[in-house]
Amino acid sequence: MINILLLFITSLALFSCDFEGEKGTIAPTRDLLKGKKLYANHCAGCHQDQGEGLGKVYPPIKDSDYLKAHFADLPCIIRNGMDKKIIVNGEEFTYEMYGIKGIGDYEIAAICNYIAFTWQVGDGKIMTKKKVTKAIELCK
């Protein structure tokens, strides 16, 4: 019983504090909920609610070998879109993805975290607003 109580208290402490102590970061639970809502509003129309993509038109996010290999590029892809051929899980995708210009770096971080933790892509670290800002500055 004591072990369960300690596990609960530890989990509560982890999910109620800011990660990396950065201004603009929030607890993962709230971040994931915000990311889920933003994903539904901006991404799911093409990539679908469960990240499975839409046939040969829009690539999957779930189980995407491309996204696993290029997760650090996701903030740039979200902000600026993508206008090049990519291969995802052996399938070629050529349709242009338009960037999302109307959201800030914090919102992009929330989408990245939702995608990373929902479909287990990325490096397992929290994407912060600061990391997104830096990634977007380095976009090609």
Image: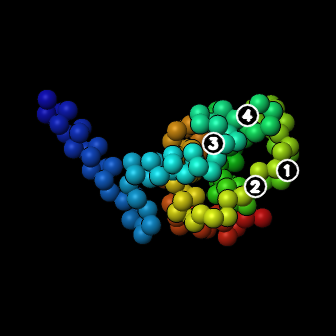
Q: Judge by depth and name the residue closer to the eye, 134 or 110.
A: 110
Residue at screen point 85% across, 50% down: 84
N-terminal-most mark, 2 or 4: 4
Mark 2: secondary structure:
strand
Q: Dot 3 corresponds to which residue?
A: 44
Compared to residue 100, the image places residue 22 above or below, namely below
Q: Dot 2 corresponds to which residue?
A: 98
Q: Judge by depth and name the residue closer to the eye, 5 or 59.
A: 59
Q: Dot 4 corresponds to which residue?
A: 54
User: Which amino acid type corresponds to the residue marked 4 in the rendered image?
Assistant: Leu
Residue at screen point 74% across, 38% down: 59
Spatial separation of the CA atoms under disc 1 and disc 4: 18 Å
- Which residue of the protein is positioned furthest toward the left in this rendering? 2
User: Which amino acid type corresponds to the residue marked 1 in the rendered image?
Assistant: Lys
N-terminal-most mark, 3 or 2: 3
Q: Quadrant of the N terminus?
A: top left
Circle 4 Cα neighbour tier, 10 Å, few/some/many (<14 / 14–19 / ≥20):
some
Compared to residue 19, the image places residue 92 above or below, namely above
Whether residue 52 is visible here, answered yes or no, is: yes
User: Which amino acid type corresponds to the residue marked 2 in the rendered image?
Assistant: Tyr
Question: Could you say which quadrant of the image residue 89 lies in?
Answer: top right
Mark 4: secondary structure:
loop
Q: Dot 1 corresponds to which residue?
A: 84
Residue at screen point 51% across, 46% down: 36
Circle 1 Cα neighbour tier, 10 Å, few/some/many (<14 / 14–19 / ≥20):
few
Mark 1: secondary structure:
loop
